[in-house]
Amino acid sequence: MLSPVCLFMYRLRVVAVTLGVLVPGCSGESACKTCVTVDQGGFTPSSLEIERGDPGAKVALTFTRTTDQTCARWVVIRDLQRNVFLPLNKPMSVEVPADAARTLRFQCGTGALKGTLVVR
Ligand SMILES: [Cu+2]
């Protein structure tokens, strides 16, 4: 579980992103293991890894596009047959089955920017 401080910092960052200001991230444990930022450099982090959950488990894979200077206004997840538009600075979540080991690839509309989520 997230510590209350990390959770608070995470919420603060969500608000801060909306307002367009920078807030330092939580040190130590990452506030969100399935959150991806989309900017000029592509997907950050571009490679995610999570633990497999119980039967039926799902996780929310969340993308936040923070700039217009990227071709990734859409994220395409072929394995799930999902194309998701990413509004500027608005976190968009995709439900991902997490009850079996798998590697899920995601990419921008043109395929120039790529990332993976590994369920192990
Ligand atoms: Cu692209």
Image: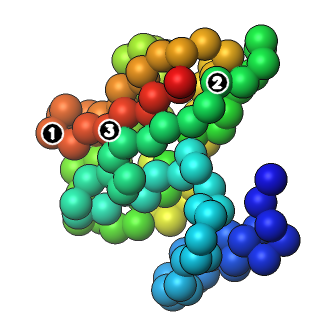
Q: Position of residue 109 (x, y in %)?
A: 26, 34
Q: Nearer the viewer, residue 83 or 7?
A: 7
**Which residue is tagged 1?**
112
Q: Nearer the viewer, residue 46 or 88?
A: 46
Q: Would you say residue 40 is visible in this rendering? A: yes
- Above or below for 4 versus 22: above
Q: Amino acid at mark 3?
A: Gly
**Along the polypeptide, which appears first: circle 2 or circle 3?**
2
**Which residue is tagged 3?**
115
**Label 2 – label 3 distance at C-alpha:** 19 Å
Write the residue at 36% across / 56% down.
44
Write the residue at 53% across / 24% down.
120
Q: Position of residue 78 (x, y in %)?
A: 38, 17
Tag 3's secondary structure?
A: strand
**Which residue is tagged 2?**
52
Q: Would you say residue 83 is visible in this rendering? A: no
Q: CB of residue at label 1: within 8 Å of ligand 1?
A: yes
Q: Nearer the viewer, residue 18 or 13?
A: 13
Q: Quadrant of residue 52?
A: top right
Q: Amino acid at mark 1?
A: Ala
Q: Amino acid at mark 2?
A: Arg
Q: Quadrant of residue 76?
A: top left
Q: Look at the numbered discs 1 and 2 and tell me whether their residues touch, using CB distance below 8 Å.
A: no
- Above or below for 54 versus 63: above
What is the crowding at mark 3: few (fewer than 14 residues within 10 Å), some, or many (at least 20)?
Answer: some
